[in-house]
Amino acid sequence: MTAPDSTTTALPTEDAIIDLARSGLSACGADLDALLAGGAEASSTITLRSPITGQVLGQMAADTAESAADTIGKAHEAFLAWRDVPAPVRGMVVQRWGQLLTEHKEDLAKLVTLEAGKTPSEAAGEVQEMIDICELAVGQSRQLFGKTLPSERPGHRLMETWHPLGVVGIISAFNFPVAVYSWNTALALICGDSVVWKPSEVSTLSAVGANALLTRAIEEKGGPAGLNGLLVGERAIGEALVDDPRVELLSATGSVRMGREVGPRVAQRFGRSLLELGGNNAAIVTPSADIDLALRGVVFAAAGTAGQRCTTLRRLIVHSDIAGELVDKIVAAYGTLSIGSPTAEGVLVGPLVNQASYEKMQASLEAAQAQGGEVLCGGTRVLADAAADAYYVEPAVVRMPGQTEIVEDETFAPILYVMEYTDFDAAIELNNAVPQGLSSAVFTSDLSEAERFIARSDTGIANVNIGTSGAEIGGAFGGNKETGGGRESGTDSWQAYMRQATNTVNYSGELPLAQGVEFL
Ligand code: NAD
């Protein structure tokens, strides 16, 4: 099935793309022309490109191993001053950053649209997440609480206290070019840490914009220079953060492949890592579900953001009694999705990030068919005539005979594999039977099914009657198994950015030993 009627053929001109970059950056306090001029003279550069048209905007200067070490050194110096600033005062910097993000929400969102290809609504939602985490972090800055415990010894006080950790390195993925950075940064800053960020090489301009707003907030509030380092470059520059012993915590978001490389290297030097890696998220739809609600939840989670969210719905596990009806509705809904430039009115599905992503999608569709799958709709490239290096594709739905090898893989593109079940417990087992463990959902009106699902789904996020994507920042965000085990955002996640100490204070004038031990 193709959806030519819903494809928006007009792509913006190359000048319009440059204008988007220039206006978004300048409103955030950076200058595109100065960045491009710097790139022309630099020995090491990075390519600036937009997936909307596939055009290259130019080259920007990239970091080198020496400049990366220098930035980390400055962040360490900044940490030594910052850790002594009272946490609620540190919170004032984050509060100001949140205000600037609110003021420049649309400007920064333009850069996210430009580089990640998100629709303006989704891009604005991403910046809203940054604002939300700033608000959460400001409140948290007054609540870095530890516990006081009863000591077994008279005249002793036993307590746990939390202290600033050091330099926090952040490596982030292209698909959430600024939000994940802010989850880490807002908490790290109130916890008394400095940050050094290596954004995705695909979304450098969004990073420059977000970082410029933070620099302004730090300057206005009198924070130390070097508190927010930015490293521009590809994977090798990320490795500078991985290997530098001054980086106490490395928070790395990206593919499982990246986590496999980074995690052991940080562990080798006994550093801490917080890994937020790939997902392979499922939704179970039971016969008691509200089908129309499930339909909307499934279509947004599977086709939204062109399937390029870590929480994108990739596996639909639907009861045989309703599979026919639900799948027909999904295919029909996919036919109405408008695909095209995210800058165009009404478009819901933007481009894939690059050619490699498109080729991986095609390879996965071929593998799925070879493994017994039937492509029910989608998979076809559109708008290739309008821009040869832009990759727009119709979201695909593939009926699978069961969970074959390809279904266990995360293909970072809009492919929804559909499988049927008859026994609910077996459906939960199928939900869990992949190496990744980020998000999952059940659509049901049966309380017992909902509770059994929450108890047994092995993912870090498990939802009822809501899709797998679109988390709020109040809850801890992260996944299990190959997703890496890290937790970011709300509740207790702040503790990852601090050093914990247990303190025993003796005010008894005697020296009783614990466990009644006698000595001297
Ligand atoms: P990627 O792994 O290709 O790159 C992510 C980042 O890691 C980039 O900044 C890259 O330069 C850097 N990097 C890669 N290899 C490295 C290495 N060996 N050492 C140091 N740095 C290295 O991922 P991507 O294509 O940008 O993003 C898509 C992936 O990210 C998907 O798998 C998606 O599920 C995952 N993701 C996960 C979350 C989450 O919270 N769990 C959020 C967003 C994206």
Image (cartoon, rainbow, N blue to C red):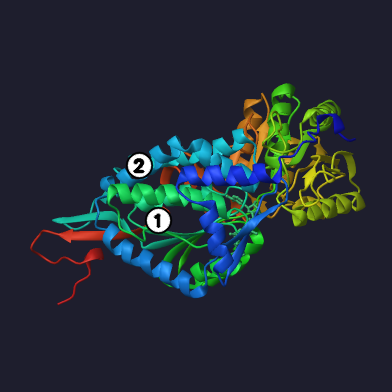
Residue at 29%, 64% in the rendered image: 80
Q: Nearer the viewer, residue 435 or 474?
A: 474
In the rendered structure, the answer to whether residue 154 lies left or right of residue 186 reads: left
Residue 396 or 39: which is nearer the viewer?
39
Residue 32 visible in the current orientation: yes
Q: Secondary structure at mark 2?
A: helix
Where residue 256 sits: x, y (%)? 65, 59
Q: CA distance from mark 2 to mark 1?
A: 21 Å
- Camera-side residue of 517 and 418: 418
Mark 2 surroundings within 10 Å by alpha-carbon count, few (fewer than 14), some (14 through 19), many (20 or more): many
Number of numbered tags placed on the structure image: 2
Q: Is residue 453 left or right of residue 351?
A: left
Quadrant the C terminus occupies: bottom left
Q: Which mark is residue 96?
A: 2
* Residue reaching furthest to the bottom: 520
* Secondary structure category for the residue under label 1: helix
**In-image side of 453 versus 208 (left or right):** right
Let me know if residue 457 appears in the view: no
- Do the numbered discs 2 and 1 sit on residues whose CB atoms are within 8 Å? no
Q: Quadrant of the N terminus?
A: top right
Question: Where residue 212 sits: x, y (%)?
Answer: 44, 50
Quarter of the image holding residue 506?
bottom left
Q: Which label sits on residue 497?
A: 1
Q: Which amino acid, by three-letter code, is at mark 1?
A: Tyr
Give, as a three-letter code, the residue at label 2. Answer: Arg
Mark 1 nearby-residue class (10 Å; few <14, some 14–19, many ≥20) = many
At 31% from the left and 47% from the top, the residue drawn is 220
The label number, if any, that marks residue 23 in the structure image: none
Image position, residue 36 (x, y; %): 57, 58
Quadrant assignment for ligand 1:
bottom right
